[in-house]
Amino acid sequence: MPVCTHRGCEKTYDEASNTDTACTFHPQGPIFHEGLKGWSCCSKRVISFDQFLAIPGCSIGRHTDLPREEFAPAPSDEKVEVTETKPASPAPVAVQNNGTEVYGSAPSSKPATPKPAAAPAAAAPAEPIIEEEDDLSVPVAIGKTCLRRGCGQTYVSEEESRGAKVSCQYHPGSPVFHEGSKGWSCCPRKVLEFDEFLKLKGCRNTNQHLFVGAKKDVKVEEYQTQTHINLSIFAKKVEAKSAVVEFKEREVNIDLRMPDGKRFKLVLPLFQPIEPAGSSFEVLGTKVEITMKKGNGISWATLEPSEGAKCWTTFGTTGGAGTVGSKVMHLATDSPLYAEK
């Protein structure tokens, strides 16, 4: 069967059942800027590459196998002012006794002393790669794609996709984007085009695909005060000893295990910075409470980074935790009103 070439879809399809609403995709190209990843046609921005691939498409149409058209930015009517710069005048020339011309300042009579070569920095030890195992007890829908990076194989049947002769070729490392080149931290090969990056074959083989992975069938709720962001993860009988909640300035990593084999994993990028030292979590009987201390005290428009969300002002009672009714206005340093304060 043909494979759809739309960005964000790339699924196999049957032309007989192809309709005008069968494909959900991104019509424009990806954007990677200052650690955030997203699509130029969408406002949502995430940090991890897996979350970027999971961003749902913003357009609906028919599947197609035609070559993908690269997105070209619309021509701008804005005039660009070009300033002509004159070449700098040559530096004064000094002539030594031996007839050698020296440009710039007067030559020094002291011979140049060679600097000792810097000792090469010791390479940091590579972190061990933990291979996630699939839950074979959970049924898989036909056509679902393997979750391992770079594999791209779809589920056909238990024998063909979960049998003894299965070969999953994938990338265990993380994507690396540097100065226009794209690749994986586990591979030396680098390419320039994003489409070519997605086609890079995996460098590790295993005998099991990952169709289910960590289960995320729990409910997450959030609310905020003037000083904290609070998350409630509703999951029963979480193992407190194995529960992991790692706080970073712009990210929180959550890994919870339940007695029945279920597992909840989430890497959550944050809209504003937090103070990791002032954040904490508590495992209760039916939920896990996570409390994150705000790094700047302003209100959050969203929990995760979003290009379209702007939050400049928050109100609070001086010395208290209220958020409305105060005459004191707190501004973020990047607020357009900050210069007028």
Image (spheres, rainbow, N blue to C red):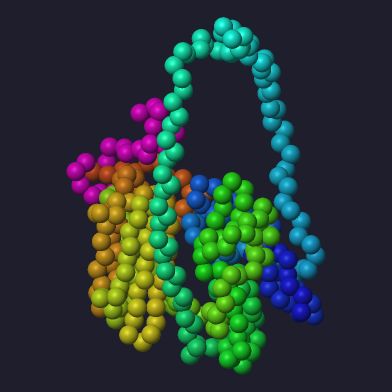
Q: x, y (%) of residue 59? A: 67, 61
Q: Quadrant of residue 201?
A: bottom right
Q: Residue at x 21, y 41 (%)?
A: 318
Q: Is residue 219 left or right of residue 241?
A: right
Front-most of residues 300 and 46: 46
Indicate the quadrant containing the N terminus: top left, top right, bottom left or bottom right: bottom right
Q: Quadrant of residue 255?
A: bottom left
Q: x, y (%) of residue 70? A: 74, 53
Which residue range is magenta in the image? 318-341
Front-most of residues 142 and 136: 136
Q: x, y (%) of residue 266? A: 42, 67
User: Could you tell me what secondary structure mostly forms the magenta stretch?
Assistant: loop
Q: Residue furthest left?
A: 319
Front-most of residues 86 and 76: 86
Determine if the magenta segment contains residue 340. yes
Q: Residue at x 39, y 82 (%)?
A: 262
Q: Residue at x 35, y 28 (%)?
A: 341
Q: Is residue 282 left or right of residue 75?
A: left
Q: Residue at x 31, y 47 (%)?
A: 295
Q: x, y (%) of residue 85? A: 66, 17
